């Protein structure tokens, strides 16, 4: 299972779809009949985006038994980015942990503050969410530059790439296939595995030949 580790961290540019993936992963894990860990915790540490969109999915997360941590300003509309007061729960939780962080080097500085605690978790994954339809990640070279910049600031090495060819509700199976070679190029040139291709659930029947699909439900309205 792609999100089976004790700790999974998602990073990616704003608009890459990382928060949708993080929420879907938390819901998926929260509904497991035989969970590997005692519960699931999702922490939204995106201090770049003051609206903390994962807050919009809080009810669905709580209904699935997922513990949710976000800034006290989440959902308020106030541009006052701040780390949630309950952040220490992340490193004391006995459950499975998912962290969603801001999209670029600036957003990943929060990981640098807690790099020792994160690196101490040996069973961890750090995924770059790659959306080739975003302006700054349309080539493997540009995306590698972003990848290395995040690694430098966070002081945590990436362990894999999630391919998320996301154009919102208008995304087609053709869009997914069109950029798959670029995703493979990025993975190969970065010496990282292409862990999964993330697609809207409705597109999955048209993409059954694509390996390691992770189906997404549309958590947020575009």
Image (cartoon, rainbow, N blue to C red):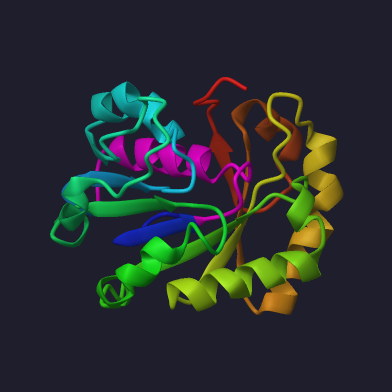
Q: Is residue 18 magenta?
A: yes
User: Is the residue 121 above or below the residue 181 in the image?
Assistant: below
Quadrant of image for the N terminus: bottom left
Q: Position of residue 87 (x, y in %)?
A: 22, 53
User: Is the residue 164 above or below the residue 160 in the image?
Assistant: above
Q: Is residue 193 left or right of residue 133?
A: left
Q: Position of residue 8 (x, y in %)?
A: 39, 59
Q: Position of residue 166 (x, y in %)?
A: 70, 39
Q: Is residue 170 left or right of residue 103?
A: right
Q: Position of residue 160 (x, y in %)?
A: 55, 67
**At 47% across and 55% down in the image, what residue appears?**
10
Task: Using the image as rendered, state which of residue 181 and residue 120 is in the foreground.
Answer: 120
- The reply to whether residue 1 is visible in this rendering is no
Quadrant of image for the C terminus: top right
Task: Using the image as rendered, state which of residue 93 and residue 2 is in the foreground.
Answer: 93
Task: Using the image as rendered, state which of residue 220 and residue 164 is in the foreground.
Answer: 220
**At 33% across and 24% down in the image, what residue appears?**
60
**At 37% across and 39% down in the image, what residue appears?**
80
Q: Is residue 221 magenta?
A: no
Magenta-highlighted residues? 11-35
**At 30% across and 69% down in the image, what residue appears?**
114
Residue 104 found in image quarter: bottom right
Residue 109 found in image quarter: bottom left
Residue 170 found in image quarter: top right
User: Is the residue 215 above or below the residue 84 in the image?
Assistant: above
Q: Is residue 185 left or right of residue 68?
A: right
Q: Is residue 87 left or right of residue 17?
A: left
- The reply to whether residue 214 is visible in this rendering is yes
């Amino acid at each position: 299972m792609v999100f089976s580790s004790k700790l999974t961290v998602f990073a990616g540019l704003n608009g890459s779809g990382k928060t949708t993936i993080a929420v879907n992963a938390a819901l998926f894990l929260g509904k497991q009949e035989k969970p590997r860990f005692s519960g699931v915790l999702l922490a939204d540490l995106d201090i770049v985006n003051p609206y903390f969109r994962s807050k919009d999915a809080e009810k669905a997360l709580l209904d699935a038994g997922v513990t949710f941590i976000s800034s006290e300003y989440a959902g308020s509309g106030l541009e006052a980015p701040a780390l949630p007061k309950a952040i220490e729960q992340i490193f004391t939780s006995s459950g499975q942990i998912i962290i969603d962080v801001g999209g670029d080097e600036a957003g990943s500085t929060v990981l640098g503050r807690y790099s020792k605690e994160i690196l101490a978790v040996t069973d961890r994954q750090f995924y770059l969410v790659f959306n080739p339809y975003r302006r700054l990640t349309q080539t493997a070279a540009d995306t590698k530059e972003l990848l290395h910049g995040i690694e430098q600031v966070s002081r945590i090495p990436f362990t894999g790439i999630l391919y998320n060819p996301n154009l919102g509700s208008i995304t087609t199976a053709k869009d997914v296939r069109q950029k798959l070679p670029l995703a493979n190029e990025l993975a190969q040139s970065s010496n990282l595995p292409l862990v999964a291709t993330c697609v809207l659930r409705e597109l999955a029947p048209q993409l059954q030949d694509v390996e390691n699909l992770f189906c997404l439900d549309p958590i947020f309205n575009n």
